[in-house]
Amino acid sequence: MKIAISALAILGALAGCVMPANQPQNKLQMTSLEIQAIQSQTFEADKRVTFNSVMSVLQDQGYIIGSASLDTGFITAESPTRHIESGPQVDLTTPMMTQILNGIFNADKRTAAVSVEEKKVVTATVEELGPKRTRVRLNFVHRKNMSGSLGQRENQDMPIVNSKVYEDAFSKIGNAIFIRRAQAEPSPTQKPAK
C-alpha cells in the first residue's frame, strides 16, 4: 500500500511537469511579417506566365491540383497521402495515470492500433503588381490524420515555416518562368507570323 501511495505521489508530481504533445519545446515564435517574408517572392513576369509556372512546379513535385483560378490568382493543391498501416500499440481505453500504474503493477492492458495518414497541402496566391511584375505567396502545411481501431480520431495541421522549403520552391518557379518566357519568344531565325 505504501508503494502504491509513493508511486502515485511521484507520478502526480511528474504529471505536472509534462509538456503538452502539441507544443514543442524551444520553438521560436515568428511574427506574421517574418512568415510572409519567407512565404513570398516577387518575379519579373506577367501574371499568366507566373501562374502557369506555379501550377507546373506543383505538379512536377507530385502535388494534385484541387482548384486554380487565374482571375483570383489562387491555387490549392495537396500531395498524395502517405498511409502508415499500424502505429505503435497504445492503450486507448484508460487515462494516462491508469496506464502508468498498470505498467508498474504489470496489470493486463487492452491495446489498439493507431493508423496515421500524412500529406502536405499548399495554397498559392499569384498577385499582379504591374504589367510584368508579380508576387507569389506559398503556404505549405503538413497535415496528419490519426485514427484508432476503437474509433478515436485526431487531426493535426502544422504550418511549414522552414525557409529552405520555400527557397527551393521559389527557385523552381523562377526556372519555370525563365523557360516559359524563352519558349514564348521567337528565335532570331524564325520569321514573325503574319
Image: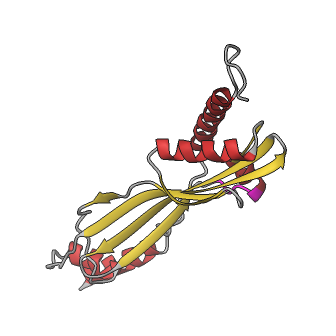
Q: Is residue 95 above or below residue 79?
A: below
Q: Position of residue 189 (x, y in %)?
A: 67, 13
Residue sitting at 23 percent across and 70 percent down? 113
Q: Is residue 194 above or below residue 36?
A: above
Q: Which of these two is toward me, 191 or 157?
A: 191
User: Can you say which quadrant of the picture contains the C terminus?
Assistant: top right
Residue 136 covered by magenta stretch? no
73 relative to 91 in the view: left or right: right
Q: Which of these two is toward me, 91 or 114?
A: 114
Q: Position of residue 186 (x, y in %)?
A: 69, 24
Residue sitting at 47 percent across and 51 percent down? 63
User: Can you say which quadrant of the picture contains the N terminus?
Assistant: bottom left
**Which residue sits furthest bottom?**
1
**Scheme by which the image is coloured:** secondary structure
Q: Quadrant of residue 23?
A: bottom right
53 relative to 61 in the view: left or right: right
186 relative to 82 in the view: left or right: right
Residue sitting at 55 percent across and 42 percent down? 57
Q: Which of these two is toward me, 30 or 41?
A: 41
125 relative to 24 in the view: left or right: right
Q: Quadrant of residue 29?
A: bottom right
Q: Quadrant of residue 98?
A: bottom left
Residue sitting at 26 percent across and 63 percent down? 87
State whether the magenta stretch is mostly helix, strand or loop.
loop
**Which residue sits furthest top?**
189
Q: Which of these two is toward me, 121 or 86?
A: 121
Q: Position of residue 83 (x, y in %)?
A: 31, 59
Q: Is residue 31 above or below residue 5?
A: above
- The segment highlighted magenta reads 28-32
Q: Position of residue 135 (x, y in %)?
A: 76, 47
